[in-house]
Image: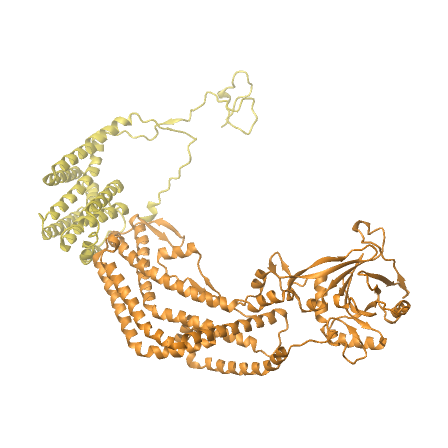
Chain colours: A orange, B yellow
Amino acid sequence: MVLKIFYPQCCNRADSGLLVGRWIPGHDSAVVLAVIHYPFIPSQVKQYLNQIQCENQGQLSVLGCWSMPKDGQEGMESFLRDLSTIFPQGRWLQLSRQIGKIGFTCQVLHRDQNGKLIQNERKEEEEEEGATELRDEDTVVFVHYEQRKVMLSQLHPVDNGVYHPQAVPSFEVWQVFQTVAQSEPLFFLDKYDEGPLKLTHWQSEGREASIIVELLKQVSTPLCLFVTWLLHLWTWFCSIRILHVRPVTFLSAKLSTCVQLQYRTEHMRILSSHQRATTHTHFMRKANILTSFLVDVALGLLLIYCLYRENRIGRLANTLVPAADHVAKELEDLLQWLMGAPAGLKMNRALDQVLGRFFLYHIHLWIGYIHLMSPFIEMILWYVGLSACLGLTFALSLLSDTVALLTFHIYCFYVYGARLYCLTVYGLSSLWRLFRGKKWNVLRQRVDSCFYDLDQLFIGTLLFTIQLFLLPTMALYYLVFTLLRLVVVLFQGLLHLSVDFINTFPLFAIGLRTFRPYRLAEGVKFQVLCEEPGTPLHLMMEINPLKSIMVMQIYRTPTYNCYPKDSWGGLIKKLFVGELVYPWRHKVTKYD
Amino acid sequence: MGADSGAGAAPGHSVPWRKVLWEHQPYPDNYVDQRFLEELRRNEGIRQYRYWPVVREAGLVAQQLSCVALFITIWLYMEQSLLSPTTLLWTSLLSAFLGYGLYQALRPGVGSSCQPRTRLADLQSATIFLSFTFGFSPVLKTLTESVSTDTVYAMSAVMLLAHLVSFPYAQPSPPGSLSLNAALFASVCLASRLPGALHTFAMLSCALLMFALWPCLLHRIKECAPGHFPGVCVSVCVGGVGGLGSQWLGGAVLLALALGSVILLCPLLLVRLQRHKDTIQGPWDEAEIHEDLIHFIH
């Protein structure tokens, strides 16, 4: 049987004393957390341990004794052995180390049924597995760990590239990490405290703290209260009855600015809640949200600085109306070209004229409205630009909405063209079946033969001929407007994707992975420290940090994902048939 | 199945051979006795054609061909403005009335098919036809403006050919969908090439008359006055050849040759080749299900 003892590196040079730690249930291992030095009173030690145990549910106990004899301290051995009678344990470890030597020696005393301790012989060399049955003695392996890093680290069980947050593996390393993390109250006493006990652990040289962190902790409570009050106001404002009318709710669902506002409100609510984050995931999510919000606001302020310097925004407003005019002029030229003989294609002149004139009139109306609004544009833009102080994502959403509003006529044209084309295509396919004497059986979802009446045949053939010859004209208009619409959609999609990226990127987690890689652990690796014959094996346990890709995957903030709704094949099929396409769809997210 | 003692055992074997496979018999598996192929039937159900009745029936094919030729002739006349649309319209109307009267006069016996159409329904149909055609004729006129002439001629030719091929010669009365639609498509293509909207309207009415209503009348004549049927066919053929000849002599000659071969040559071939017919049937054929669903529909 191999007995593993996890020994903190900070206690390698500690003075002689008692070992305090925990036996790991189910495995043959022990975790040493601290060393209590002489002189001590055993009853005070027991009292202290009970007090710690009541505060958190760890099961701390005295594991054994540690001796590193300095000059003038001989004779401790018998004293140490007598201690084992004071603290009743199942097993008693007696570790000792000589100054100048690297390896420890260890003796394990078992308690038999009578309560007497029996000493087992320790093994000289590393035991091989095949010889276990021959000798029933303990082999001891020392695993050294860095206490501070293990305490702060969080283990992520990753199985084949998939993260299982709920899985609590029962393997040892997890238990070790849990034990060290839960024993934080044990590390509060350092060697400058005037108490009855003197401990050695990672913080025994004195507790460190940062002034900035302490100040932030003090400031955070009133700040949270303030943010909560603001949120209350905002929620009250949003629940006014007049804002719940159908058109307003429809509009607010479509405008990406409103969606982004909702999203940020939800974030603020998470951040300003009264409870501290209990689980690691919760804490990481809050931290990620906070950092991304701060970065967002910083970028937004930078944008404002760039825009408002030298009155750039005024100049931008002045170019907006001429830009809209220019777009309208280009569209008119396009329509005139279509009404002629575009690319040498022969179109049906009458239909061409009808469609062309209809769309031209639309553009004329649109330009009229733009010119009506032009005196107010500069002022509106000036005030709206100020709202970029809420974040760069906000500014990008506003840009996307502005583009949508300015190209509304292109959207209208696309819808008209698509509906006409769709009607033609469906009519043609149905009348083609009539041409051959068949019809579509809706019940059986198949094509059946059918006896048509003379009237039906006659009118059906006439309509079929008309639609067949008018199809090229309709198809050309549909193609042109669909291409325009796709360009606009692509641009809007790019904006949404960048907003999404800023929203979901886990900046805090990536920063942690870069600067403090031991905080996010995937596993551990062992390195052999000392393998001398005559001493037990010493291993060094190092933390294996999580891969960056896994960090991104695990800690992405869930969001209203902007993702393409159809696959390429589906999209092309829809375009071919004339169905209206809305390529980007927002996913509604649920918060747990 | 079933072995008779009369079948006789093959020499050398005591047990008579039976045509079963589930018994182990002392014969090899591919053994056959002298009853082999006694269930073979040759030329079952074959009909002996006689020349003149076949010629009579072939008259229908010939007259349809001439109908198409006649239609093309009328179109040629209209295109060259030798025939005015109003004349054509009045002629079509008159012929329609005459035809309708003849149709009603030749009503078959009492025990014929289910509901005869009422006069009101006929009037309704006629109104729908005329109003629709009149309303759509300006649109139809501009349909093939941008298509080149060769394409239009090619399309019409293909469609008329399809019409001739898919025409229900056995029973022309409910007009076959594909044949009627093809003919109407061809007539719309051709009619859109004419100079004016009224021309288009007249052409379409004429096409409707010739391709949709004339076969019904012909069917009625064939059923109720079979003695006059060959005369009608001959007159239509003569009209077709003559009409085409007045515009295009070569075409008339070709048409005459085609008609001659259809009426006279093909029946001869059919009768002659009937002698060489040699079909065999037997119990090895696939089973055929003879179920006539037409009786359930009409």
Taking B28 as reference, is A426 left or right? left
Q: Residue at x 34, y 70 (%)?
A: A406
Q: Quadrant of residue A102?
A: bottom right
Tell me if residue B275 can be seen.
Answer: yes
The answer to whether residue A171 is seen in the rendering is: no
Q: Position of residue B36 (x, y in %)?
A: 45, 23
- Measured as percent of width and height from the top left, residue B31 is found at 50, 22
Foreground residue among A121 and A260: A121
Is A494 or B278 nearer to us in this picture?
Answer: A494
Q: Nearer the viewer, residue A456 or A534?
A: A534
Q: Quadrant of residue A59?
A: bottom right
Task: Tell me what residue is drawn at x 26 percent, y 64 percent.
Answer: A332
Q: A9 or B287, which lies in front?
A: A9
Q: In the rendered view, tell whether residue A491 sits above or below residue B239.
A: below
> What x and y, as percent, mark residue A467?
27, 55
Choose top left, top right, bottom left or bottom right for residue B140: bottom left
Residue reaching furthest to the top: B12
